[in-house]
Image: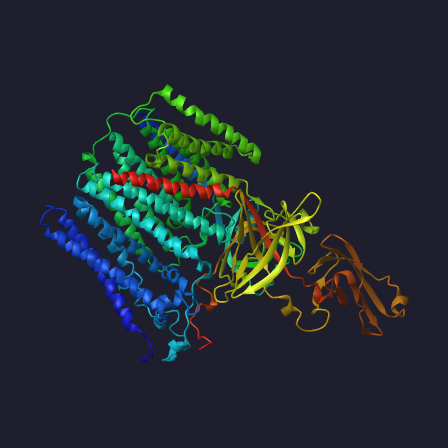
């Protein structure tokens, strides 16, 4: 046993004590709340124990968080988690990102939010405290167990950031570095993934995990309602929580979209990636749940649906957790967590709460008040219910497809996602979105219970007519041809206009009471912006110069990228784009790309400069980050997909005029590529003008006839000659001066039927270049405006609900 | 029949439809062998880059063509023509998934997924130079 120098094992021990304590206290809190729920509210001794346990649990969680932060701040690289997720060089502002980059940290973030929610509930939930907190404490116990890091009968329970020392990690145990007792002196962390080193990583995960955490509150209320047979009463306190959840989870998801759009190279804000999907789906069902709760509040119907949708929301959160953390998504997702070997534990977590809710529903089924009469067709609740069903079926479709890797594993299949994932999802989700927006628009003008049909049509006509006019106008203006897109265009306008109309004419502009209408306008705007910006996005960097003669007959399915040589100007859409060279600032290489427009007199007018970058990271790989210019009506997105990262000075530092030659073994008809041209070997020619080269009749001479095409398809001819003069190989070089190319024909392999020709290029040929992609997204600001409007609307609705 | 039953039937029909289209429009993880046999079908092929063979990317000629050789999980090697720019840090990839069809030229891929995150060769603890 070696005595290592400078290790801070005390911190880990403390952290570990907090971990064990947090688990034990959560479990104790759950058990005592369970018994407390069976006793009177006054003098409830079980409740006292439960409250103390939950407080202790809260303190432990805060303790865990503090110790982990302390370890990260002080670079305790002896701990695998700290080594894995941080490094000395990393700026302090990314400390939060390091904290929740790993599975353990993100579980902690989730646990932390539920601690906050639990403490709020203890204060405000009154008679619901015991039954609701039973479930929440139990969920906390499950989450706390994810950090335990114990092995029981060979099964791994949790992954503990405090007990896993770097030198004990199986992969690294035999590294010579750890033979040195003073290894810490020389150790630096692996560092944070460069993709995650931006402010989005600081704000997106906490928002998303708060959204995840919030779904547990309606779930716990629903369980309590079934268990205590207060089948309707649980909804009154649960409904505001559902709305907070909708708002926060929605914001978190949209932040993820904004991140992908701004900083990652997705080329859009939504890619139907499995990880995106698995947070969207619970949001859809939560929206459904909140709406059926509204129905139930007004007419006492749809009780089973309230339970079902509330349960399924939380179950889907657990299922998403399983998908993203068990490693099962494997190849299908770009940003799932790495597998920590906890899939079994995650499955137990999922199935425990799935079966708990199922069994409760089955046991209490007979006692559930059943719906006696049908809702009238012309009632708000009927269409709201249909809307919730559409959301459910839309979730089902997304989830079924996202779960392909699960089906593969279960049934031993080899299915892969559809070749064009985005198109596939859109083909189903656009009709669903159409239905939902129609319901959103029409629903507001319907009354609960029953509506006078004539009155309804009279009121709604304005919105219908206006949206048809606007949709037609926009569809023609944008040349929108796909009929589904046109339908959704109409229905989104309808949702926006009908709700705005309702706000103005029916609510008389009393915005306080119009939270729902405002939120619905926001939702409509989101869909409208998404529809226009994605369906009419224009890749302006398509290769129009047609410089490659040979590959033109090939099917080029996605020629999105274009080559831009330094100081050259190419037309892209309405812009003229010039690459002005690159500059290195710190670890980033910025590419200066200037956009111009041309006015009627043919003069260039400078518009703006974009600076997409490549971040150099030798340990984790380079990361390219796009740059986007925002206008009111459109965004111009520019992404460098390939670039030579060396500078010209580095390249031409030494040697003569020509770079080192490159040998080519070719036959007649083959093509050689140089940096500025393509060169075809047309024929071999023995009829050489011998006088010109001063050759005798006994010498051997073969010319290679080349045709070269430069970028502008200009044609050049050149003939290097292979010569054996008096038995000695003595080739005659030939050059194309304009292209800076030198050819030497130096070998013939008659048995193979090919020849060897070396080509060298002038160093000055090596012009700096980039390969880039440029996309114009029209009206994407409509989408972001919609997000903000929806958040404001939900806040208003919430405010009204809490005030009542 | 109550209205709720009709709605139920419609919902079930849509759900079955969703399952069927997912199954029918999904591609398949396959080996090169299978992809060669069915040149009309789209496949996902998982494999590794053959690091001994040259990769060709001539943006001057075609910025949307990158050629490399890949060995699939069964050990078959094939030329891959990726119709995209050369991905960042391609050489570091541990595992690649290419999506496309096979023809006489080789495997014509429209898209590529690479797995490289935490498992870089350099992902091991190492000594720092600066002190």
- Along the line of sight, the residue nearer the viewer: A125 or A618: A125
Looking at the rendered structure, the number of numbered marks drawn on it comes to 0
What residue is shown at x 45% (from left), y 49% (from top)?
A258
- Along the line of sight, the residue nearer the viewer: B25 or A128: A128
Q: Is residue A487 above or below residue A274?
A: above
Q: Is residue A268 left or right of residue A710?
A: left
Q: Is residue A422 above or below residue B123?
A: above
What residue is shown at x 44% (from left), y 78% (from top)?
B131
Percent across and percent down for residue A766 are 68, 63
Whether residue A230 is visible, yes or no, is yes
Q: Is residue A111 left or right of residue A532?
A: left
Identify the residue at the far left of this view: A43
Percent across and percent down for residue A190 are 43, 68
User: Quadrant location of the N terminus of chain A?
Assistant: bottom left
How are the colours assigned in the image? rainbow
Q: Is residue A334 left or right of residue A320?
A: right
Q: Is residue A648 above or below residue A295?
A: below
Percent across and percent down for residue A50 are 16, 54
- Along the line of sight, the residue nearer the viewer: B106 or A240: A240
User: Quadrant location of the C terminus of chain A?
Assistant: top left
Whether residue A285 is visible, yes or no, is no
Quarter holding residue A453: top left
- Along the line of sight, the residue nearer the viewer: B38 or A255: A255
Percent across and percent down for residue A198 are 45, 58
Identify the residue at the far top of this view: A454
């Amino acid at each position: 046993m070696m005595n290592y120098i400078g290790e801070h094992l005390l911190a880990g021990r403390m952290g570990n004590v907090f971990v064990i304590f947090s688990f034990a206290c959560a479990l104790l809190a759950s058990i005592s709340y369970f018994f407390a729920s069976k006793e009177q509210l006054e003098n409830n001794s079980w409740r006292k124990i439960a409250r103390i346990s939950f407080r202790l649990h809260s303190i432990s969680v805060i303790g865990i968080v503090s110790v982990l932060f302390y370890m990260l701040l002080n670079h305790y690289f002896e701990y695998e988690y700290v080594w894995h997720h941080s490094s000395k060089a990393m700026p302090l502002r990314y400390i939060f990102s390091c904290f929740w980059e790993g599975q353990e940290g993100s579980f902690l973030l989730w646990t932390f939010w539920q601690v906050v929610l639990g403490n709020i509930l203890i204060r405000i939930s009154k008679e619901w405290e015991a039954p609701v907190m039973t479930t929440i404490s139990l969920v906390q116990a499950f989450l706390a167990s994810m950090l335990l890091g114990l092995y029981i009968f060979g099964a791994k329970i949790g992954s503990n950031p405090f007990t896993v020392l770097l030198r004990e990690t199986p992969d690294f145990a035999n590294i010579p570095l750890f033979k040195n007792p003073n290894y810490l002196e020389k150790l630096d962390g692996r560092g944070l993934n460069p993709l995650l080193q931006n402010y989005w990583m600081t704000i997106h995960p906490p928002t998303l995990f708060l959204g995840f955490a919030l779904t547990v509150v309606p779930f716990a209320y629903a369980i309590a309602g079934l268990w205590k047979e207060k089948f309707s009463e649980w909804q009154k306190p649960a409904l505001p929580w559902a709305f907070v959840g909708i708002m926060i989870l929605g914001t978190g998801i949209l932040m993820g979209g904004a991140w992908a759009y701004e900083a990652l190279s997705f080329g859009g804000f939504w890619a139907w990636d499995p990880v995106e999907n698995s947070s969207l789906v619970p949001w859809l069902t939560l929206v459904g749940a909140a709406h059926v709760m509204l129905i139930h509040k007004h007419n006492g119907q749809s009780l089973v649906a309230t339970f079902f949708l509330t349960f399924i929301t939380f179950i889907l959160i657990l299922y998403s957790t399983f998908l993203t953390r068990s490693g099962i998504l494997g190849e299908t997702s770009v940003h799932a967590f790495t597998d920590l070997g906890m899939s079994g534990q995650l499955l137990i977590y999922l199935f425990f709460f799935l079966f708990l809710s199922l069994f409760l529903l089955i046991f209490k089924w007979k006692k559930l008040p059943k719906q006696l009469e049908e809702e009238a067709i012309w009632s708000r609740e009927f269409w709201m219910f249909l809307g919730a069903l559409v959301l459910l079926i839309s979730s089902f479709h997304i989830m079924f497809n996202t779960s392909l890797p699960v089906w593969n594993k279960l049934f031993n299949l080899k299915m892969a996602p559809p070749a064009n994932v985005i198109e596939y999802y859109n083909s189903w989700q656009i009709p669903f979105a159409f239905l939902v927006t129609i319901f959103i628009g029409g629903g507001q003008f319907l009354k609960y219970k029953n509506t006078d049909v004539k009155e309804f049509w009279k009121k709604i006509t304005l919105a219908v007519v206006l949206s048809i006019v606007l949709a037609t106008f926009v569809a023609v203006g944008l040349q929108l041809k796909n009929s589904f897109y046109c339908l959704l265009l109409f229905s989104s306008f309808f949702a926006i206009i009908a709700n705005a109309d309702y706000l103005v004419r029916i609510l008389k502009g009393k915005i306080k009471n119009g939270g729902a209408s405002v939120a619905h306008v926001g939702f409509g705007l989101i869909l409208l912006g998404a529809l226009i910006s994605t369906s009419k996005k224009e890749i302006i960097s398509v290769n129009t110069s047609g410089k490659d003669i040979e590959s033109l007959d090939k099917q080029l399915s996605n020629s999105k990228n274009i080559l831009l040589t330094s100081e050259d100007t190419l037309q892209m859409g309405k812009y003229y784009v010039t690459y002005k060279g690159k500059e290195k600032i710190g670890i980033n290489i910025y590419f200066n790309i200037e956009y111009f427009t041309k006015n009627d007199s043919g003069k260039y007018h400078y518009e703006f400069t974009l600076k997409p970058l490549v971040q150099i990271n030798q340990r984790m790989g380079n990361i390219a980050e796009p740059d986007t210019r925002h206008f009111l009506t459109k965004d111009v997105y520019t992404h460098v997909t390939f670039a030579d990262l060396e500078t010209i000075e580095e390249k031409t530092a030494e040697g003569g005029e020509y770079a080192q030659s490159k040998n080519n073994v070719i036959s007649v008809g083959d093509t050689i590529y140089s940096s500025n041209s393509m060169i075809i070997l047309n024929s071999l020619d023995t009829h050489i003008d011998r006088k010109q080269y001063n050759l005798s009749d006994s010498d051997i001479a073969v010319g290679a006839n080349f045709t070269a095409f430069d970028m502008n398809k200009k044609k050049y001819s050149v003939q290097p000659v292979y010569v054996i003069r008096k038995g000695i190989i003595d080739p005659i070089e030939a050059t194309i001066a304009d292209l800076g190319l030198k050819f030497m024909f130096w070998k013939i392999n008659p048995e193979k039927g090919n020849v060897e020709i070396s080509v060298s290029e002038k160093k000055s040929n090596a012009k700096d270049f980039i390969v880039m992609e440029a996309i114009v997204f029209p009206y994407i600001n409509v989408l972001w405006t919609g997000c903000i409007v929806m958040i404001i609307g939900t806040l208003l609705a919430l405010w009204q609900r809490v005030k009542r | 029949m109550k209205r709720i039953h009709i709605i139920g039937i419609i919902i079930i029909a849509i759900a079955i439809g969703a399952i069927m289209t997912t199954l029918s429009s999904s591609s398949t993880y396959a080996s090169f062998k299978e992809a060669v046999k069915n040149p009309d079908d789209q496949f996902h092929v998982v494999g590794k880059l053959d690091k001994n063979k040259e990769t060709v990317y001539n943006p001057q000629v075609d910025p949307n063509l990158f050629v490399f050789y890949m060995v699939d999980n069964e050990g078959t090697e094939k030329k891959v023509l990726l119709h995209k720019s050369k991905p960042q840090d391609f050489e570091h990839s541990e595992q690649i998934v290419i999506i496309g069809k096979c023809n006489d030229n080789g495997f014509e891929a429209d898209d590529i997924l690479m797995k490289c995150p935490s498992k870089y060769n350099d992902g091991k603890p190492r000594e720092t130079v600066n002190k």
